[in-house]
Structures are given as structure tokens and as C-alpha cells.
Image (cartoon, rainbow, N blue to C red):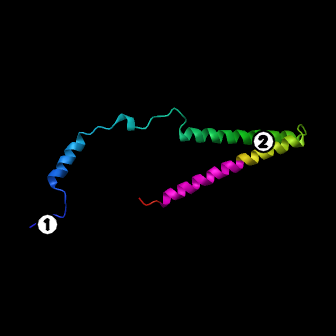
Amino acid sequence: MTISTSMISPNAVQGAYRNSKDLVADASLKPEKTEGQSFSEMLSSASARVISSINEADTVMEAGLKGELDTQQIVEATMALESSVTVAVSVRDKFVAAYQEILRMPI
């Protein structure tokens, strides 16, 4: 003797399953592809800009040590370098925190 604990009949379940096979996804619900940069391309270009900024500041500092530039230009290059490094370190810290959070996720 079997006791049915379900309020839904097996025939209704089979009918719903057959009907679901006939369903077709609506094309308007699919996400549109954008023509923008991918995340890796954006990250690569941002890191290239930071490296370029570091190289420019290094060149300015070398010229300042040789006496070719005044102190104001050296200070401006140093401040720009500090800003770039601060942003790069902040982004790196966010990536590390996100990676650690992923590692803590249960599988």
C-alpha cells in the first residue's frame, strides 16, 4: 500500500513536462552583445597606462637629477606617479580580496 503525499497527480506532471518541451525561448530575452572592450582588454589597457605613467615619471626624475628640469616639473611628475601607484595598488588589493572570497565559497 502506497501513500501519496503529493497534491499533484503524476499525469499533470507528465503533461507539464510534455508542454515544456514545446516551449521556445523568446529572442528578445537574449542579452545583446556589446561591441565594447572585454574585461581582460580593459584591464590590460589600464595596466599599460600605469606602466607608461611610471616610465614617464622615471624619465622626468632622471632629467631632474641631471639638472635639465626645474623642481616644479619633478614634483608634478612625482605626484602623478604617486596617484597612479595608489590606484594600481588599490585595484590589486580588490582583486586579491575577490580571489580570497572565491576561495572561501563552498563548492
Residue 90: numbered disc: none
Crowd rating for badge 1 (residues with CA inside 10 Å; few <14, some 14–19, many 20+)? few
Q: Residue, x 19% and y 60% (percent of image)?
A: 7
Residue type pointed to by label 1: Ile
Helix, strand or loop under label 1: loop
Q: CA distance from mark 2 to mark 1?
A: 80 Å
Say which residue label 1 marks: 3
Say which residue label 2 marks: 57
- Locate residue 77: give its quadrant: top right
State the residue in front, 2 or 71.
2
Helix, strand or loop under label 2: helix
Q: Residue, x 55% and y 41% (percent of image)?
A: 40
In the depicted structure, whether residue 35 falls above or below residue 98 = above
Using residue 6 as the reference point, say whether residue 67 is left or right of it: right
Residue type pointed to by label 2: Ala
Rendering coords of residue 103 (x, y %): 49, 58
Q: Quadrant of the N terminus?
A: bottom left
Using residue 64 as the reference point, say whether residue 84 is left or right of it: left
Using residue 26 as the reference point, say whether residue 14 is left or right of it: left
State the residue in front, 92 or 36.
36
In the orientation shown, which residue stands out farthest toward the left? Answer: 1
Q: Residue, x 17% and y 47% (percent of image)?
A: 15
In the depicted structure, whether residue 46 falls above or below residue 107 = above
Q: Which residues are magenta?
A: 85-104
Magenta region, main secondary structure = helix
Rendering coords of residue 29 (x, y %): 38, 38
Rendering coords of residue 67 (x, y %): 91, 39
